Image: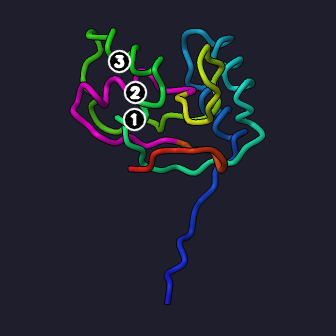
């Protein structure tokens, strides 16, 4: 007999509220990214994703991590990053980091291989 796996979905509107409540620097750019990705209209699940696969998929994230030697290792648990559609100059994809570049860079500095992320109900994601 197969065991049924229960998934707890999180509304995009709830995620948007949390991000906007904690964002401290360029709130207008964050709002634009969240709007473009249509975050509020989707459902998400929190899961662990492979950081190296995210870096391979998202060249802007990879470049950010490579260029930021000033970011120290993550200590403790950080909020999940947000995966979805992001405005880019390259190919369209739903598997890019919308919110959480610094958290990914801190996880890499700490030697972590996986990170928690809010992943959209639809789209391709690299699960750890």
Task: Give the CA distance from mark 1 to mark 3.
Answer: 17 Å
* Location of mark 3 (residue): 65
| SS for dot 3 | helix
Q: Quadrant of residue 67?
A: top left
Residue that lies at the very extreme toward the front in this rendered image? 91
Q: Quadrant of residue 61?
A: top left
Please tell me which residue lies in front, 23 or 48: 48
* Location of mark 2 (residue): 103
Q: Residue at x 66, y 19 (%)?
A: 87
Q: Which residues are magenta?
A: 98-117
Is the Cβ of the residue at disc 1 closer than 8 Å to that at disc 2?
A: yes
Position in image of residue 21 (x %, y %): 61, 26
Does residue 53 appear left or right of residue 18 in this picture?
left
Identify whether 55 is placed above or below 25.
Answer: below
Position in image of residue 38 (x %, y %): 74, 32
Identify whether 70 is placed above or below 16.
Answer: above
In primary-sequence order, the first of circles 1 and 3 is: 3
Q: Quadrant of residue 51?
A: top left
Q: Residue at x 61, y 17 (%)?
A: 88
* Location of mark 1 (residue): 78
């Amino acid at each position: 007999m197969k065991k049924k796996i229960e998934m707890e979905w999180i509304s995009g509107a709830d995620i948007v509220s949390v991000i906007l409540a904690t964002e401290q620097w360029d709130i207008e750019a964050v709002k634009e990214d969240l709007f473009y990705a249509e975050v509020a209209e989707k459902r998400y699940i929190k899961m662990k994703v492979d950081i190296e696969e995210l870096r391979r998929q998202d060249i802007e994230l990879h470049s950010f991590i490579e260029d930021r030697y000033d970011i120290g290792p993550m200590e403790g648990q950080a909020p999940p990053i947000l995966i979805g559609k992001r405005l880019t100059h390259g190919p369209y994809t739903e598997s890019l980091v919308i919110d959480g570049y610094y958290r990914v860079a801190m996880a890499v500095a700490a030697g972590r291989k996986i990170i928690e992320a809010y992943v959209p109900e639809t789209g391709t994601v690299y699960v750890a």
